[in-house]
């Protein structure tokens, strides 16, 4: 069997067996070999099962945004319809976080070990619900501290992180 067929078969069996980590890995590999809406939706479903809601949201959104050309195979059209139908449920489960660093011209901030681009500071961004590890480090400012914060879904208090100020403001949107 070709690598695409092998990855897709393993992914489907893993998903049905509840091994969503293996399913996500293999659906991702198959989709990188031959991008297809059906594989992207299957990957998003596995990511959602793993609680990787931002990745799932991005995958579903791309499928909806890209669509398929007229005359595309039925499985591709069905995948776009499925993505459009499943996207709102994923979006409702996302948490939103706004990171601000007041009074600092240049800041280096990471959330859960992932750098936050300076252009994204002060901008509301989707995050997976749960504990966040903020690692502030502002250029020219001493003593950033490590803190853990919970990112909450809308309606439960959105999280506003203020690294370096020693405060954390939870205001509702």
Image (cartoon, rainbow, N blue to C red):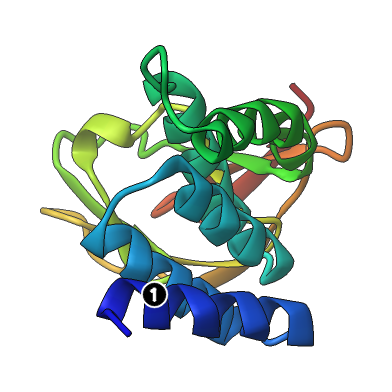
Query: Is residue 162 visible to the viewer in this orientation of the structure?
Result: no
Q: Closer to the camera, 165 or 40?
A: 40
Number of marks in picture? 1
Query: Percent position (x, y) of residue 45?
Result: 65, 57
Residue at position x 67%, y 71% from top? 50
The relative height of residue 86 versus residue 85 in the rendered view (above or below) is below
Element type at mark 1: helix
Q: Is residue 77 above or below residue 114?
A: above
133 sits to left or right of 145: right
The residue shown at (44%, 21%) is 67
The residue carrying mark 1 is 5
Work out which quarter of the rendered image holds the C terminus and state it. top right
Given residues 109 and 21, the one toward you in this image is: 21
Task: Answer whether residue 130 is visible to the viewer in this image.
Answer: yes
Give the left or right position of residue 125, taking residue 66 as reference: right
Quarter of the image that includes the N terminus: bottom left
């Amino acid at each position: 069997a070709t690598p695409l067929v092998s990855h897709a078969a393993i992914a489907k069996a893993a998903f049905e067996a509840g091994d969503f980590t293996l399913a996500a890995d293999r659906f991702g590999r198959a989709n990188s070999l031959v991008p297809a809406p059906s594989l992207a939706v299957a990957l998003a479903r596995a990511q959602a099962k793993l609680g990787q809601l931002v990745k799932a949201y991005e995958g579903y959104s791309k499928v909806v945004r890209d669509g398929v050309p007229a005359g595309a195979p039925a499985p591709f059209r069905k995948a776009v319809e499925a993505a459009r139908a499943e996207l709102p449920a994923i979006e409702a489960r996302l948490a939103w976080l706004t990171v601000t660093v007041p009074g600092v011209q240049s800041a280096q901030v990471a959330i859960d070990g992932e750098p936050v681009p300076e252009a994204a500071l002060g901008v509301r961004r989707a995050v997976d619900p749960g504990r966040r590890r903020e690692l502030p480090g502002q250029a020219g400012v001493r003593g950033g501290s490590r803190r853990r914060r919970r990112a909450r879904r809308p309606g439960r208090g959105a999280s506003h992180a203020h690294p370096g100020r020693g405060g954390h403001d939870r205001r509702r949107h």
